[in-house]
Amino acid sequence: MTSAYVLLIDDDEVANFVNNRIIQNTIGGIKTVSFLTASEGLNYLKACNANGEKLPEYIFLDINMPEMSGWEFLGQYADLDAEIRGNIKVYMLSSSQNEEDFRKAEMNENVSGFLNKPLLGKDLLEVVDHNI
């Protein structure tokens, strides 16, 4: 798992910092890249693909963000080439307790799961163990 890396997309800089620390403290040796906007995350994925760079194995995506929400990100993500999306597991990471958000995540074929903020080490381990 040490060769894997995670893309964090959350408009809260502190949340990205905390989630990165949890990832490093729980598993360690994992590259993390974070963005404060969903559009930057999409552009990053496209650039990695265009440049032949390794794509992340996991994306932890916030729902409620200005400019482009997590749901809008997923709409555009679905339009990306299958080779970009192929091995990426997207997890919604949100403080939302809205049942509709849970249902939307469950129904979206590009979402592997829904995790509550803050990311917990035990949840991270469950995600990684589930995908090995």
Image (tube, rainbow, N blue to C red):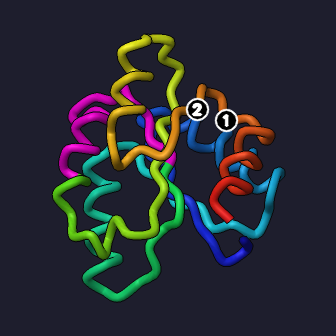
The image quarter in which residue 36 lies = top left
Q: Which residue is mark 1?
A: 119
Amino acid type at mark 2 = Leu
Give the residue at x 57% y 42%: 16
Sort mark 1 into few (<14), some (14-19) or many (20+) by Cα contacts within 10 Å: many
Q: Up-down: is 98 above or below 119?
A: above
Residue 92 location (% of width, % of height) = 47, 37
Cβ atoms under marks 1 and 2 closer than 8 Å: yes
Give the residue at x 42% y 50%: 35
Amino acid type at mark 1 = Leu
Instruction: Give the residues in magenta.
Output: 60-76
Residue 70 location (% of width, % of height) = 33, 36
Helix or strand or loop: what does disc 2 sit on? strand
- Residue 72 on the magenta span: yes
Q: Which residue is mark 2?
A: 115
Sort mark 2 into few (<14), some (14-19) or many (20+) by Cα contacts within 10 Å: many
- Of badges 1 and 2, the one in the foreground is 2
Is residue 106 left or right of 117 when viewed as pictured?
A: left
In the image, farthest residue toward the bottom: 52
Q: Which quadrant: the N terminus?
A: bottom right
Give the residue at x 27% y 70%: 82
Q: Up-down: is 14 above or below 52?
A: above
Is residue 63 left or right of 113 when viewed as pictured?
A: left
Most foreground residue, 123 or 50: 123
Most foreground residue, 104 or 97: 104
Residue 114 location (% of width, % of height) = 52, 33
